[in-house]
Image: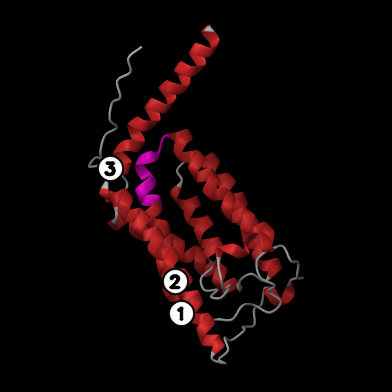
Amino acid sequence: MNQIYKEKYRLLNYTSEMLQYIIPVIKSKYFYIGVLSIITGAGLNFASEAYLHNYMSEGKTLPMLSDLILDNLPFYNVSLIYDIACLIPILLVLIYFVHKKDYNRIPFFLLMAGIFYIVRGIFIVLTPFGNPPMFNGSDPLFHGFSNYELGVYPSGHAGNVFLLLLLVKDNSYKWLIFICLVVVVGALFLARGHYSIDILSGLFFSYAIRSFGEKHLSMFDLGNSEGPLPIRIVQKI
């Protein structure tokens, strides 16, 4: 019974400690602005893909490009690999927040990802390339995430993973996400998921957005001196 009581107390203590940091974040307006930016970015991407679908339904075509790297690589249908390798960093970041107690930076993460997808949603329409030759679409497991697989510039897969790599501060997590990035980029090339310019631009866009955010939007990092302090939860034993 003593052991069970100790385990329950340890769990209660850990949960209380976590809430001390999470509650001020959830109460912050910056958290909700970050969430709104994510929703806006996702909605804009879906809308852009729908626009391209309607564009092609009118009998118009999207240009397929020549690509020095893709033209010299064999084709392998490994779309499932790059989709899974793109999701793993998101799980790693969630673990990172809990493990490193870096909850105060959640609004900044959300805002940076939201801005990336807003920018991507705009560029999908501004530069409407067709999918690379031989692209077979995503694995059936991921078909439900998007009605239309149109719009390639810049790469959301590569850009999102690289952005998370730039945002985490712990080197161990950086290396794990870097491995995922290498897998994503390699699989995208082999499966013809993106042109090389899409992938490289996704990396550059992510770096530029992170740099802009750190310089002009640092207030979304609640760990700054202006940010809220963790609240205290008093436990009665």
List x then y, in percent, for residue 227.
25, 41
List x then y, in percent, for residue 134.
71, 77
Report whether residue 209 is seen.
Answer: no
Which of these two is toward me, 47 or 194?
Answer: 47
Asked whether 108 falls inside the magenta stretch, the response is: yes
Q: Please tell me which residue is depicted at 54% across the width and 44% down the height of the picture.
A: 92
Name of the residue lying farthest toward the bottom: 59
What residue would you read off at disc 2? 121
List x then y, in percent, for residue 98.
46, 35
Q: Which stretch is magenta?
A: 101-109
What residue would you read off at disc 1? 125
Q: Please tell me which residue is depicted at 28% across the width and 42% down the height of the picture.
A: 27
List x then y, in percent, for residue 225.
24, 40
Crowd rating for badge 2 (residues with CA inside 10 Å; few <14, some 14–19, many 20+)? many
Give the number of marks. Answer: 3
Q: Which mark is drawn over residue 27?
A: 3
* Residue type indicated by callout 2: Gly
Q: Quadrant of the N terminus?
A: top right
Q: Looking at the image, is 130 positioned above or below residue 81?
A: below
* Residue type indicated by callout 3: Lys
Marks 1 and 3, how far apart at CA: 36 Å
Do residues under tags 2 and 1 come within 8 Å of each other at their CB atoms?
yes
Crowd rating for badge 3 (residues with CA inside 10 Å; few <14, some 14–19, many 20+)? few
